[in-house]
Image (spheres, rainbow, N blue to C red):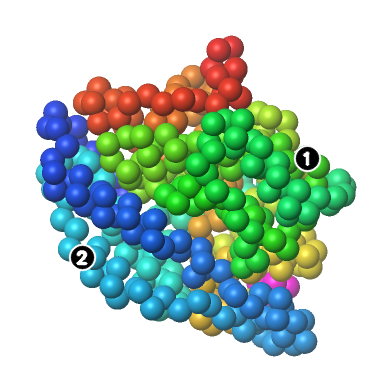
Amino acid sequence: MRARSQPACAKYIVMTNPLPRSLLDADAALHALHKRRHFSEYLNPINAQEARKAFDAGAPAPPFAYRELDWADEELRLLDQLKPPGDHPMGELLNRAIHRNRLLILALTLRTTEAFDALAREACWYPDDELLVQAADQRPASDRARFVLGAHDLVAALRAALDERDMRDWALELDPVMSARVLVDGPKRLLKVNSRARFRERDVRKLIVHEIEVHAQRSANGARQSLKLFASGTPDSLVTEEGLALYAEYLAGVQSPGTGWRQGLVVQAVDWARRMGFRELYNRISDVGGRALAWGITQRIKRGLADPAVPGVYAKDVVYFVGFHQVKAWLEAGNPIENLYVGKVAIDDPVDEWIAEGWLSPQPVPSLFRRIAAV
């Protein structure tokens, strides 16, 4: 896959300056914000089941309700006060992260098509024509394995996996207000499991490599660096983050049948949602993948919007399809997996240069990837 072009501000000038105090202070303040607030709590609807009943009864869109961001103005003022040095490459990186967080808070506050569009354009989430062709070319496959485990079963397995990896300071929590089945909050050292979710036996190993050996481990490694930005993620790290998690599933042999096809359908649905309201999008996806899949995809990419009946999209979910292909190509071209475990970085981040400057240090790599690197 051809890597998408990055914004001009994604280029960095490497300098030999030590990390200045103003940079460290701004970084600490941004990290503290991430420890105070978990944005998905305000992105996911708190009435999903009731809203679906209304939609099934004929409403043009489910009447989603959300937690109110009564702290938004306070945190936006804090972000405005952060002034990392713009002439330092890490200052430029942190400024971009601050701007990205501002756009997300505004999207969750305003909940308009325009606010989510600004976020998507800044993050380069919208698929281009080449990506849409590749997404449409995936082959479907059915997963016939039965759901036999509940949320408590998964929590027990994840707890054991964390303890085995000496990550005993990480907590686990059941949460009924989630669109995902499992979610990692790195700054809080917390894994959340959807209390309403069911799991296949294969999902245990799959979620250990995906959520713990990628998301939690990269965040834990990043927390050991001088800049805590590497625990929450550099501005362009999300594509690599989710791509590496899917590649870990692939290496472990636990990727669900049809994953590429479903993620390809998500990419197409993000493009359709820019022109369609909830009902039209749901019907379009139903024609391709059935009603159950249509509800899951449509809810995820229309969540956050105050009025999902109008065109608009939370476009983040394209990162799974894009990221898997980018990370797979990058690693199989011989690039070092060690660079991706200094923290939450992107494959395009100049990690070798940052290590040479002393701004990053190498960190542990999970055994799954160490075996691959040794081949």
Asked if residue 324 lies left or right of residue 35, the reply is right
Q: Is residue 211 above or below residue 356?
A: below
Query: Which residue in the structure is indicated by mark 2?
Result: 80
Image quadrant holding the C terminus, namely top right
Q: Which mark is residue 202?
A: 1
Could you say which is closer to the camera, residue 69 or residue 53? 69
**Magenta stretch, residue numbers:** 279-283
Q: Is residue 299 above or below residue 202?
A: below
The part of the image, by quadrant, that contains residue 54 is bottom right
> Which residue shows up at 62% across the image and 84% down it?
63
Asked whether 280 falls inside the magenta stretch, the response is: yes
Looking at the magenta stretch, what is its main secondary structure? helix
Asked whether 311 falls inside the magenta stretch, the response is: no
Residue 31 location in percent, x, y? 33, 52
Q: Is residue 342 above or below residue 88?
A: above
Q: Residues within 10 Å of mark 1 (few under 14, many from 20)?
A: some
Residue 50 location in percent, x, y? 70, 81
Residue 184 location in percent, x, y? 54, 50
The kind of residue tagged 2 is Asp
Q: How far apart in space, not on screen, are marks 1 and 2 (Cα)?
A: 46 Å
> Which residue shows up at 55% across the image and 48% down it?
171
Q: Which mark is residue 235?
A: none
Q: Secondary structure at mark 2?
A: helix
